[in-house]
Image (cartoon, helix red, strand yellow):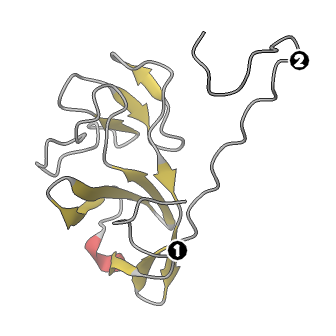
Amino acid sequence: MFPPVAPRAGEKLCALADIPDGGTWSHLYGAARAIFPVVVARKGAELIAYVNVCPHQFLPLDGYMGEFLTDDGEYLYCMQHGAVFRLNDGVCVAGPCGGRRLLGFNVEVRGEDVVMGRWPDAPARPPADPRDHSPPNRAR
């Protein structure tokens, strides 16, 4: 399930022309404490979308300055603490949140518009450890 202020599937995010090839587009949905910040990168026909929040300290990658990409255009950069994320999968490859990843979501191109796609399913819970006999939701 997506955050309540996130655009719904099929909702227009922007025009495809708003995202330069090799560049990014960002926007804030909602206001105050209920925001859903997005960044969409474009590499040719491929669009890659993430929630604009660094997993290190949950701050915007760009500090709301609109600068996301490294000079080579292959990585997203967090200007807050220097974390570097692979553009294609959002995995942090350098900086204080090594190994964690950005939260991605699906977008689609419909005509000349970029629209919100289906929100990815939540990851499955790991199987319960059969050795664990403690009652659920109980502190140990």
Rendering coords of residue 49 (x, y %): 44, 57
Which is in the foreground here, disc 2 or disc 1?
2
Q: Nearer the viewer, residue 111 or 36?
A: 36
Position above or below: 136 against 36: above
- Whether residue 23 appears in this view of the structure is no
Dot 2: few (<14), some (14–19), or many (≥20) neighbours within 10 Å?
Answer: few
Question: Residue tagged by mark 1?
Answer: 108
Question: Which comes sooner in the sequence, label 2 or label 1?
Answer: 1
Identify the disc placed on residue 134.
none
Dot 1: few (<14), some (14–19), or many (≥20) neighbours within 10 Å?
Answer: some
Position above or below: 130 against 9: above
Amino acid type shown at disc 2: Pro
Tell me the quarter of the image containing the C terminus.
Answer: top right
- Determine the residue positioned at 44% across, 27% down: 92
- Whether residue 118 appears in this view of the structure is yes
Rendering coords of residue 98 (x, y %): 44, 18
Position above or below: 81 against 35: above
Question: Residue tagged by mark 2?
Answer: 130
Direction bottom: furthest residue? 111
Q: Nearer the viewer, residue 115 or 8?
A: 8
Tally the marks: 2
